[in-house]
Image (cartoon, grey):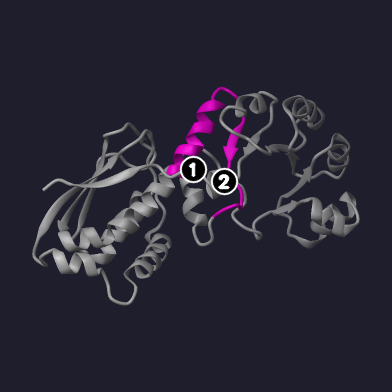
Amino acid sequence: MSPLPTIMIEPAVRAALLEDLGRAGDLTTDSIVPPDLTTRTILSARQAGVVAGLDFAAAAFRLIDPRIEMTVALPDGSRLRPGDTIATVTGPARGILTAERTALNFLCHLSGVASATRGIADAIEGYRAVVCCTRKTMPGLRFAQKYAVRVGGGSNHRFGLDDAVLIKDNHVAMAGGVRPAVERARAGVGHLVKIELEVDTLAQLEEALSLGVDAVLLDNMGPDMLREAVGMVGGRAITEASGRIRPETAPAIAASGVDLLSVGWLTHSAAVLDVGLDWAG
């Protein structure tokens, strides 16, 4: 995985640190820990998963005190076992303790997203389908969460409202039908912008194909209907399945022949991965 540029990471981490420091800084650490004390700590995995977000953790420590050094043993994308050492963090003890929670918040959350993505990617291994995320992201963290999806072996859907057209049921209703919705979208965007249409019936799919859309979002269709839909498409458009996809249901959906499995919960409600920072002397 190519790392995200520092210029993207630091503003998010800086905002999180400022939120935590508030108006008076770290009262607990500054009262208890001598200012000249240095220490060594270990970022360790407490459960199995995939690590993601180490650059965010490193930025938290660096922004609090540039003298803190983080040495990575298992880079982003590595599979973790309980007890694995992910990285060592050394330097001024006050700075390490002050940055600890913010560093772990990013690391645990992004590792959770990557781990959830890997769970589905592993479940559909051997099929042509790829798991992808959606715009159901936490405000301000979309770039980070979508990065974590890639780390976990997934792909990204559109990043926002401005890089692709996705016509959904409310658009169709307000436009007065599928055809006017597609025609208006095609007239309103540039030639490089792809158009995807959400359908939940085979009749809608047939109309979408007649209009030459680039992709179809096959919403809440069971495996049998998905298989029929993929046959209808016949390679004329990208096929994307969505709706209640979990690791245990993903293989049957992937077996239908769809290109993409679109999973919103990867970013809006994936469980964190338990990672701790332990004092090592």
Q: Which residue is mark 2?
A: 156
- Which kind of residue does numbered mark 2 sit on? Asn
> Across the whole image, how many numbered discs are drawn on residues?
2
State whether residue 37 is above or below residue 252.
Answer: below
State whether residue 250 is above or below residue 279.
Answer: above
Q: Are marks 1 and 2 in contact (CB under 8 Å)?
A: yes
Toward which corner of the image does residue 241 lie, by quadrant?
Answer: top right
Using the numbered discs, state the Cα–Cα distance from disc 1 to disc 2 in whole angstroms.
7 Å
Q: Residues within 10 Å of mark 1 (few under 14, many from 20)?
A: many
Q: Residue at x 73, y 37 (%)?
A: 220
Give the structural element (helix, strand or loop) at label 2: loop
Q: Nearer the viewer, residue 52 or 247?
A: 247
For this view, does 221 lie left or right of residue 86? right
Report x, y in % for residue 50.
40, 37
- Which kind of residue does numbered mark 1 sit on? Arg
Q: Residues within 10 Å of mark 2 (few under 14, many from 20)?
A: some
Residue 250 at least partly seen? yes
Q: Residue at x 22, y 58 (%)?
A: 96
For this view, does 191 lie left or right of residue 11? right
| Residue 165 counted in the magenta span | no
Report x, y in % for residue 159.
59, 54
| Residue 131 counted in the magenta span | yes
Q: Residue at x 40, y 68 (%)?
A: 15
Quarter holding the N terminus is top left
Report x, y in % for residue 88.
21, 46
Q: Nearer the viewer, residue 189 or 130?
A: 130
Residue 2 at least partly seen? no
Toward which corner of the image does residue 176 lie, by quadrant?
Answer: bottom right
Q: Which residue is mark 1?
A: 150
Instruction: Give, as a single range, the part of the protein colored magenta.
Output: 112-137
Mark 1 vs 2, N-terminal side: 1
Give the structural element (helix, strand or loop) at label 1: helix
